[in-house]
Amino acid sequence: MSSSDTLYSARFLTPEWLERGRDNLAKCRVYRDGALAAPSSGTVSVFNASNLEVVAAASVTISGSVAQYTITSGVLGAELLGAGWLFEWSLTMPDGVAHIFRTDGGLVRR
């Protein structure tokens, strides 16, 4: 990162726990200087504990300045329960640059 890069910070309060058997809405809130910053577009990829891509660079929607994506129950049906998942958000921010934000997660029964 160069000293001229715009600094953005994603706030993930907890790991992203996905519940088997239902659709799950994952969100990525990004801030700059303490204020919510709205991305213009982006994608999300989700990797299971075996590092296999479960969701491959799927387009996100922006609602209320927050990037979000629904992971359907059908995508999770054959996956094993457990932690060790990775969520990778590539979001184009107001500076016109795609920034990468990552968080951990897992698949749980409920």
Image (tube, grey):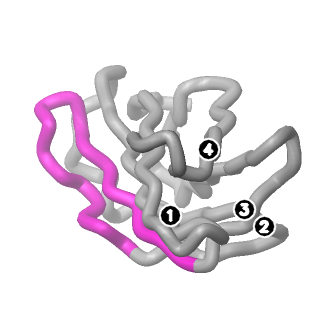
Residue at position x 30%, y 23% in the image: 84
Residue at position x 46%, y 33% in the image: 103
Give the distance between the C-alpha atoms of the residues marked 4 and 3, in whole angstroms.
17 Å
Camera sees residue 73 = no
Question: Which residue lies under the disc numbered 3?
Answer: 66
The correct choice, above or below, for 8 with respect to 109 in the image is below
In percent of width and height, residue 82 lies at 33, 22
Question: Which residue lies under the disc numbered 1?
Answer: 91
For label 2, count other residues whose C-alpha is less than 10 Å away and answer few (under 14), some (14-19) or many (20+). Answer: some
The correct choice, above or below, for 10 with respect to 58 in the image is above
Point out the image quarter for the N terminus. Answer: top left
Give the distance between the C-alpha atoms of the residues marked 3 and 1, in whole angstroms.
10 Å
In percent of width and height, residue 66 lies at 72, 62
Query: Which portion, as a residue range, is magenta?
Result: 41-58
Residue at position x 82%, y 42% in the image: 33
Disc 3 element: strand
Point out the image quarter for the C terminus. Answer: top right
In percent of width and height, residue 31 lies at 74, 46
Give the distance between the C-alpha atoms of the residues marked 4 and 2, in whole angstroms.
17 Å
Give the distance between the C-alpha atoms of the residues marked 2 and 1, in whole angstroms.
12 Å
Left or right: residue 110 versus residue 98 is: right
Work out whether mark 4 precedes mark 2 in sequence or the reverse, and give the earlier one: 4
Secondary structure mostly seen in the magenta stretch:
strand
Question: Which residue lies under the disc numbered 4?
Answer: 7
